[in-house]
Image (spheres, rainbow, N blue to C red):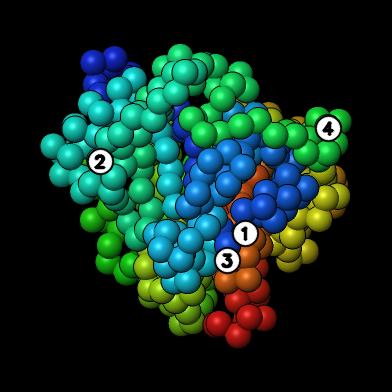
Amino acid sequence: MTTAQTQPTSAVSTDPLALIDVDHVRFYVGNAKQAAYFYAHTFGFRIDQIADLTTGSRDEADYLLTQGNIRMLLTTPLTKDHPAAEELKRYGDGVKEVALTVNDAQAAYDQAIANGAECAQAPRTLEDERGTVTVASIKIYGRVIHTFVSRTGEYAYDKLRAGGMFMPTFQKIDSPLNKYNEENPCGLMYCDHFVGNVEDGKMNHWVKWYEDVMGFKMFKHFDDADISTEYSALMSKVMASGNNLIKMPINEPAEGLKKSQIQEYLEWHDMTPGVQHLAFRTDDELKTVAELRRRGVDFLNMPDTYYELVWDRVNKMLTDHGHEAVKEDHQRVRDLGILVDADDEGYLLQLFTKPLQDRPTFFIEIICRRGSQSFGKGNFKALFESLELEQERRGNL
Ligand code: FE2
């Protein structure tokens, strides 16, 4: 394990690439109306706004789902010529866009292009009587793009965050599920990190891209000695924005006796890199996971042997570094199948869903940090053994 020191650099307001927030994450899905119901029912998202035929959107339907400071946008094409139609055929449902709020989207885009980015969509301003939203997109790996977003008037970032309007053509809608979700909160607060799977030998290319184009720094580094099982392995480097607001681990497959889970992802994703998982942050892992399990979220199962070893490993690490042991009830953690890991700064609790669509591609992680800023490397071995069990069941090992 080589751990690069965290190097937070304060965001300088004159830097056009100073990121304010994750504006939204857009998924391309085959049927946004049904996907909205799924994410609202299973993960407790509010179905907040819609742009579709009824609001004047003729070529796509968009559902804005919200929870805490998470804005998930589900887009489905309404015509065969929409670019999403071809992408859905090739990759299935998945993340299309990680959008980043900035002060000036045009300036951020110009800077990124000057730094070597490739245009995905030139800057354009959407406008109506409520205000403006300027968007400009650059390509990253595979089908994924980063979109810079800047907002004015009723669409301003602070208003959006407080539940305001998303963009022109969107209208507020209501769903009976919204009231239910308010009464039964899942506790998801914001996006902790996004993980990309890239092809063998491409990880360092994308590390350099994030450094050169986005001004990101390497946050943590894992090599295949850390993240390997008897059968499969990966390498991962974590890139973070200057203010550590956004963290993007990048995985590539590594040599193993059997097929790497990263390789499996690529094979079911038209051999194209993409977002493997999104981690949502909670400050009460037990409450969140209990509620999500009650709602039917399908989580990975850990072998029982995991809990025979984990407490000694984690609590020793914590006490060795002058921290208190894990405060959550150990039996409850085990009953809920939650994973625990610790480093010199503290500990974290995390759990991963199974893939959320029939293709073994995208999944979600639920993470709670108690001081630790890492990503659960101590769990990687246990996790991958569990993942491989699932892979074997799918006949992909
Ligand atoms: Fe993760």
* Mark pair 1, 2: CA separation: 27 Å
Q: Within the image, what quadrant is residue 113 found in? A: top left
Q: Which residue sits at x=73%, y=45%?
A: 40
Q: Which residue lies under the disc numbered 3?
A: 384
Dot 4 falls on a residue whose secondary structure is: helix
Outermost residue toward the bottom in this view: 395
User: What crowding class fits label 1: few (fewer than 14 Cα within 10 Å), some (14-19), or many (20 or more)?
Assistant: some
Callout 1–callout 4 Cβ contact below 8 Å: no
Name the spot of residue 156 as percent of width and height, x first.
47, 18
Q: Which mark is residue 31?
A: 1
Name the spot of residue 199 as percent of width and height, x first.
33, 67
- Circle 2: residue type: Ala
Q: Which residue lies under the disc numbered 4?
A: 179
| Residue 296 visible (yes or no) | yes
Q: Within the image, what quadrant is residue 20 found in? A: top left
- Circle 4: residue type: Lys
Q: Nearer the viewer, residue 272 or 238?
A: 272
| Residue 18 visible (yes or no) | no
Q: Within the image, what quadrant is residue 21 found in? A: top left
- Circle 3: residue type: Phe
The tag earlier along the polypeptide, 2 or 3, is 2
Q: Nearer the viewer, mark 1 or mark 4?
A: 1
**Is the residue 225 above or below the residue 290 in the image?**
below
Q: Nearer the viewer, mark 3 or mark 4?
A: 4
User: What crowding class fits label 4: few (fewer than 14 Cα within 10 Å), some (14-19), or many (20 or more)?
Assistant: few
**Is the residue 260 above or below the residue 209 in the image?**
below
